[in-house]
Image: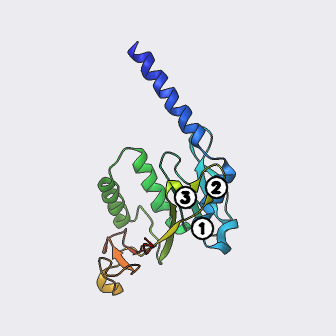
Amino acid sequence: MKTSLTIILAILNLTVLFAQIPSAEIQIKTAELAAPTDKRAGAMIYGYNNQGNWVVLRKGTNELICIGDDPKQKGLSVSCYHKDLEPFMARGRELKAQGKTFQEIFDIREAEAKSGKLIMPKQASNLQVFSAKEENYNATTGEVTKGSYRYVVYIPWATAASTGLPTKPEAPGMPWIMDPGTHRAHIMIDPVSKE
């Protein structure tokens, strides 16, 4: 009896999840919001199919890769990054799927990047995140009434000394370097709160 109830609850949870997955068109429309306007049409897009599986929704023709919103999370969060970051991003997704913690993922990628197994970009590479609160996003139409951008520029192995950047933000919207001296060193530019 307990097993039957567990199976029924699992089926209901999957049914709710699948009902919440926006169409491929909506996922593409919203994922593109993270890309610069002139690059949107040519960006590769990852998202979810009707079964909730991670898939390529559109093959790209330029240097950008965009990630659709996770339907299991509240609100909207989409991102877009340079294709040279794909080995780093793909390895992170693979390790997360294996159940690794944030710190385990960091440590594994750090070791692999140092050994040359994980190829990191040789130049600065941008990632942009566009997000909106749940009340400002309509998953049925893909319309967003308010949203904000966060910018991340990956510069592996860079430090505060090599960039002249502080290691924490000292003013709203000020660039700063996070994870300095590591494979994951990146410049953070957080949105300035309008509230």
Relative vertical location of residue 160 with respect to residue 18 in this rendering, above or below:
below
Residue at 42% x, 62% y is: 118
Residue type at numbered disc 1: Leu
Relative vertical location of residue 22 with respect to residue 87 in this rendering, above or below:
above
Q: Is residue 94 left or right of residue 63?
A: left
**Mark earlier in primary sequence (2, 3):** 3
- In the picture, residue 16 is in which quadrant? top right
Can you see residue 128?
Answer: no
Q: Nearer the viewer, residue 60 or 27?
A: 27
Q: Which residue position holds label 1?
A: 64
In this view, the residue farthest toward the top is 1
**Figure quadrant of the N terminus:** top left
Residue type at numbered disc 2: Gly
Q: Which residue position holds label 3?
A: 136
Asked which secondary structure carries label 3, the reply is helix
User: Which disc, if any, is residue 38?
Assistant: none
Residue at 44% x, 55% y is: 91
